[in-house]
């Protein structure tokens, strides 16, 4: 009886060993490329326009952050730009006729002061000759005459500056200030656009952990999308089959459903094995190393659900 049991167990182990040797398939999972949208700034969420599981199209707005602060800054930048435009217009038009007329009047008044000071100096000189005046008084008259002449020269220079108009350097300066203000305004307008999170692909909303009214920090993941047309299979291939695989080579994929098996091409094989590094293993354990492999699914199988289990085997 005992010998019979031993024989039965031996046959069972042999059968199991044979089954393991005949097994050529590996199990993988259907995946899709992910596209994550993060918060550009720390701000409140004002609107969430989609739900998890929704199909979205490229260019569709998914979520909006509060824009009151950015709009206020845009108003400020627009006001600064309008002020600079007004200054440029003033410089381009040049001085008003009234300002030139006042400068001409100032020249005439200064010339009259020079004539009066000249007459006083001449009278003072006569008084000094006759002994009725002093040299100190004559010196005062001479100083007043020189000051009046200086004022005439100053008034003429101011009139000449007005008549010559704006200097080219002034126009260059104001143009530079306008360009800088326009750049600041463009940055704020870009910041306003960034507050609306837009899908760049046709995709399915996979994760949407936030709600309106939540305050998010800069860089926080707000929406995670699964891109529709980029399905692939992720599978771990054992080391003893690694040498039989190459980029672009076909493998058979059998979905865990009624769908018949189909061929898919290898698009990626990781160079290093997963988990334990090969140099830390002995000869027997190295055969158990697994290499991450990705298979590009044909367009006819793009409808397979993300997360579906499939069996992958050599053709």
Image (cartoon, rainbow, N blue to C red):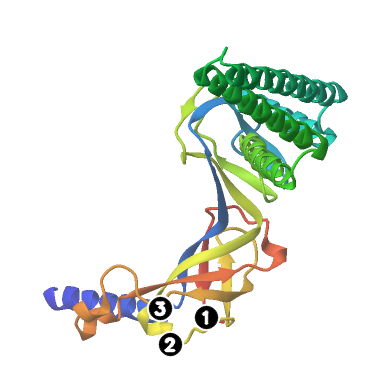
For numbered disc 3, what is the local secondary structure? Answer: loop
The mark that comes first in sequence, 3 or 2, is 2
The residue indicated by pointer 3 is 271
Which of discs 2 and 1 lies nearer the camera? The answer is 2
Closest to the observer: 47 or 139?
139
Mark 2 and mark 1 residues within 8 Å of each other at the beta carbon? no
Q: Say which mark, if any, is on residue 150.
A: none
The N terminus lies in quadrant: bottom left
In the rendered view, would you say 11 is above or below 148?
below
Residue 247 appears in the rendering: yes
Q: Say which mark, if any, is on residue 314.
A: 1
* Percent position of residue 229, x then y: 68, 58
Identify which residue is drawn at 52% across, 53% down: 307
Work out which residue is located at the far top of the displayed protein and give it: 132
* Percent position of residue 33, x then y: 57, 57
Q: Is residue 218 left or right of residue 109?
A: left
The residue indicated by pointer 2 is 243
For the residue carrying disc 1, how many other residues have a C-alpha within 10 Å: few (<14), some (14-19), or many (20+)?
some
């Amino acid at each position: 009886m005992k010998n019979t049991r031993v024989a039965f167990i031996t046959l069972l182990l042999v059968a199991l060993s044979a089954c393991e040797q005949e097994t050529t398939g590996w199990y993988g999972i259907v995946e899709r490329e992910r596209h994550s949208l993060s918060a550009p700034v720390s701000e409140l969420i004002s609107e969430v326009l989609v739900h998890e599981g929704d199909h979205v199209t490229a260019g569709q707005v998914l979520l909006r952050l509060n824009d009151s602060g950015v709009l206020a800054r845009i108003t400020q930048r627009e006001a600064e730009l309008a002020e600079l435009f007004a200054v440029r217009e003033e410089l381009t038009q040049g001085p008003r006729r009234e300002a030139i007329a006042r400068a001409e009047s100032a020249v005439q008044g200064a010339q009259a002061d020079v004539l009066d000071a000249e007459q006083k100096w001449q009278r003072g000189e006569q008084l000094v000759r006759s002994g009725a005046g002093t040299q100190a008084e004559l010196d005062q008259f001479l100083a007043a005459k020189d000051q009046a002449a200086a004022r005439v020269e100053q008034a003429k220079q101011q009139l000449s500056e007005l008549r010559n108009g704006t200097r080219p350097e002034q126009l260059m300066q104001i143009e530079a200030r306008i360009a800088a203000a326009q750049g600041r305004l463009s940055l704020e307008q870009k910041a306003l656009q960034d507050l609306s999170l837009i899908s760049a692909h046709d995709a399915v909303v996979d994760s949407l952990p936030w709600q309106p009214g939540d305050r998010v920090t800069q860089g926080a993941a707000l929406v995670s999308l699964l891109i529709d047309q980029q399905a692939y299979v992720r599978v771990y291939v054992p080391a003893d089959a690694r040498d039989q695989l190459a980029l672009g080579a076909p493998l058979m994929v059998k979905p865990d459903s009624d769908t018949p098996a189909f061929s898919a091409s290898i698009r990626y094989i990781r160079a290093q094995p997963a988990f334990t590094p090969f140099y830390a293993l002995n000869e027997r354990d190295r055969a158990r190393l697994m290499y991450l492999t990705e298979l590009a699914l044909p367009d006819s199988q793009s409808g397979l659900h993300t997360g579906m289990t499939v069996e992958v085997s050599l053709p």
